[in-house]
Amino acid sequence: MITLKLNGQDHQLDVTEDMPLLWAIRDVAGYNGTKFGCGMGLCGACTIHIDGLPARSCITPIGSVVGQNVSTIDNLHADPVGQIVQQAWLDTAVAQCGFCQGGQIMSATALLKTNSNPSDEQIEEAMVGNICRCGTYNRIKTAIRQASTHLKEAKA
């Protein structure tokens, strides 16, 4: 039995320590917002936060996150920065097929929580490895800039 602190709650999961965190989140804990993309940590669809930092859940063994806070897109509505990022995504109509967007939003939120006024270069660096098959990269960057502006206004 492994205790996983997931989305602010302790979950007792009957899994092995080497089980990929993605499958524990989706198949055992029942949170289905985090998506499987490549299974090799290359596409970003499975991005979650571990103690606030973005991580690829498909290559992270659950045993390595015991005692840490794991957050998924399913609970991002409870995060003030996450709310602003999600609204920016809607306002700029980023999503086409939407499959990668959970991972994109999680990476963008992690960036803006540590740097609320990133440069274009910092945005591009933070989003490396988040693949969008529909090619909405310009809208993603626009949404991140918009969210940054709203964060600055909220602090003023």
Image: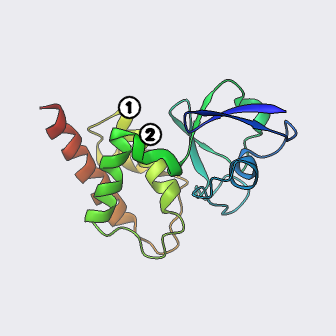
Q: Residue 63 sits in which quadrant?
A: top right
CB within 8 Å, label 1 to label 2? yes
User: What colour scheme governs how the chains and residues are painted in the rendered image of this protein?
Assistant: rainbow
Please provide percent x and percent y for residue 128. 50, 51
Tell me the number on the disc at residue 27.
Answer: none
* Front residue (pair 8, 153): 8
Please provide percent x and percent y for residue 47. 58, 49
Q: Element type at marker 2?
A: helix
- Which residue is the site of mark 2? 110
Q: Is residue 69 above or below residue 39?
A: above
Tell me the number on the disc at residue 114.
Answer: 1
What residue is rendered at 61% in x and 59% in y?
43
What residue is rendered at 26% in x and 38% in y?
117
Q: Which quadrant would the C terminus be assigned to in this image?
A: top left
Residue 29 horizontal side relative to residue 114, left or right: right
Q: Is residue 14 above or below residue 141?
A: above
The amino acid sitting under disc 2 is Ala
Q: Residue 4 sits in which quadrant?
A: top right
Q: Residue 42 sits in which quadrant?
A: bottom right
What residue occupies the far right of the structure in this picture?
A: 16
Cα separation, mark 1 vs mark 2, equals: 7 Å
The amino acid sitting under disc 1 is Thr
Q: Is residue 67 above or below residue 92?
A: above
Please rate how many residues cluster around mark 2, counting C-alpha atoms within 10 Å: few if below 14, some from 14 to 19, many from 20: some
